Amino acid sequence: QVQLVESGGGLVQPGGSLRLSCALSGNIFSTYVMGWYRQPPGNQRELVATIAFTLATNYADSVQGRFTISRDNTKNTVSLQMNSLKLEDTAVYYCHARNRYNNKESWGQGTQVTVST
């Protein structure tokens, strides 16, 4: 069974930076397309970014140019570097893994990111 353990997050001022990390265990890392989703207060969960084993990436328009997703295939980790943070980036951020063979999904427990003055 796949387990995703997140770290990072916290409180930051507008314009600041944070880095989220997520470690996958329980299966072969190369099997998974990894990603980050977020759920702002009172809103639905939305895609932030994804990265394939080939390192191909995809970003939501709202974070393009500010956030960078990366993965270390030797350490089974995925990270999200968030720069130039805005108030509207405040959300619970979730690590996500999708098995590229059977599309089975797994989620992390979520980590809070708060951008505030």
Image (tube, rainbow, N blue to C red):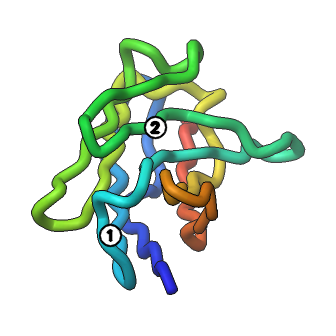
Residue 95 in view, yes or no: no
* Near-viewer residue (116 or 64): 64
Spot occupied by residue 81 in the image (x, y as percentages of width and height): 31, 38
On screen, residue 7 above or below 2: above
Residue at the outermost front position? 101
Give the residue furthest to the left: 74
Question: Percent from the top left, x then y, of residue 56?
Answer: 32, 28
Q: Toward the viewer: 38 or 70?
A: 70
Is residue 10 rendered to the left or right of residue 55?
Answer: right
Residue at 42 percent across and 75 percent down: it is 5
The answer to which image quadrant residue 103 occupies is bottom right
Badge 2 amino acid: Thr
Mark sitting earlier along the chain (2/1): 1
Q: Which residue is under mark 1?
A: 23
The local crowd at label 1, few if under 14, some if 14 to 19, many if 20 or more residues have their Cα within 10 Å, is: some
When the figure is inspected, residue 48 is found, relative to residue 4, above or below; the finding is above
Q: Amino acid at mark 1?
A: Ala
User: Who's the residue at 42% across and 68% down the image?
Assistant: 6
Q: Nearer the viewer, residue 58 or 21?
A: 58
What secondary structure is found at the residue carrying circle 2?
strand
The residue labelled by disc 2 is 50
Q: Position of residue 85 (x, y in %)?
A: 45, 28
| Residue drawn at (37%, 67%) of the image | 7
Residue 69 in the image: above or below residue 5 = above
